[in-house]
Image (tube, helix red, strand yellow):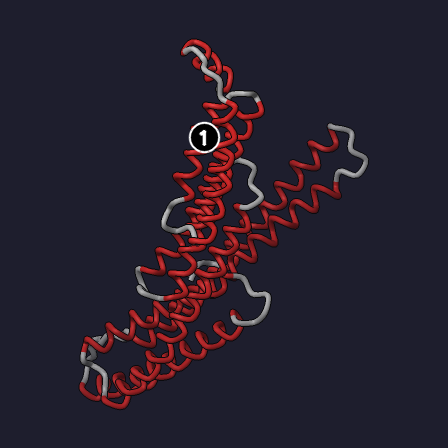
Amino acid sequence: MPSSAGYLTAAIVIAAGLFFLLWWMLVRSGDEAPWLPAGLAASVVLLVALSAREVVMRRAWNRYLLDNGINQKHTPSHSSHSSSRGRSQKKSFSASLNSAALRTIQKQSTAADLPGSTPEAHLEVAHLCHDYLSGTDEAMRSGSLGSEKGIAIRAGQERVRALHKHHLLTWARGHSRALLYEAQPRARTFDKIETANKALECIDSVVRVYPNEPELEESKVAIGEFIASVKVAHWVELAERSAFKGHYRRAIDRYRDALFYLNQDVVKEEVRTAGTEKIERQIAELQSRLKPINPSRHDAEFREDQ
């Protein structure tokens, strides 16, 4: 365990240093109440430091429970009597810590399922479940467990496996949905696609653990449709801009680029059909406006459009 006094002392020193630095800068700039923003900034730093320590220490304690309750190793003793007594105490201690680890997982699982919880809370529970399952699998392979304890651990594993799947799927659904919401208001097409790809990576990471899960496949299709729609909208916008400038050939080429992305497999059939009909009408209308032009004029229009 890291030193609490040392950590708190360092956090207080950093917060105090930030307070005096901001206070000095605001005094020089002529602020009427320099202590207010300086105190607020120092308080935020201190609160963040305390919150971060709480999260880290809680995770460390959970791992301690899992490691010491499951992976107890035999230590040499000086006499057969003390060795027998130590093994008896260790067995009892391991069983109690194993139960405590299960209670911790169940408690955090219940908290994560409450309304308003974040996807990160579900991911935290999934990590705890993974740690528990890894530790118990190692203990079961060691062959040092009694039959009763082995039955208890197997029962705990069944419960934890169900919780692991539930919380990992919930995290993937919530995190990918949040990323899609984040992508929609982005101004640049590149930013939208990049953020949507992060959501797709999130789903793929869970698919590697739970393949052939219908919920994950549906999420992948929805994200793929979003990416395709962003690309189609991008090329349609460029085509409309070219048509407005009178560059009909260039507009037709860009409409065809939009058709390419519209005809991806991830796009639903009804959406693809309606979009294709609309774009083809636009192309036909532009083709009717075309007049024979020489190559030099076409190149000039292209450079102006660029």
**22 left or right of 178 in image:** right
Disc 1 secondary structure class: helix
Q: Is 72 on the left-hand or right-hand side of 23?
A: left
In the displayed orientation, state which residue is furthest to the bottom. 148
* Residue at 47% from the left image edge and 55% from the top image edge: 176
Residue 257: horizontal and vertical position, in percent? 41, 34
Q: Is residue 239 above or below residue 97?
A: above
Between residue 162 and residue 251, name the one nearer to us: 251
Q: Is residue 257 left or right of 13 when viewed as pictured?
A: left
Residue 245 vs 236, above or below: the answer is above
* Rendered position, 182 above or below 134: above
Q: Residue at x 43, y 48 (%)?
A: 198
For this rendering, which residue is in front, 178 or 292?
292
Q: Within 10 angstroms of label 1, few (less than 14), some, or many (20 or more) residues?
A: many
Residue 165, by quadrant, is: bottom left
Residue sitting farthest toward the right:
32
The image shows residue 18, relative to residue 203, as above or below, that is above
Q: Quadrant of residue 25?
A: top right
Q: Quadrant of the N terminus?
A: bottom left
Residue 182, image x, y percentages: 54, 48
Residue that badge 1 annotates: 254
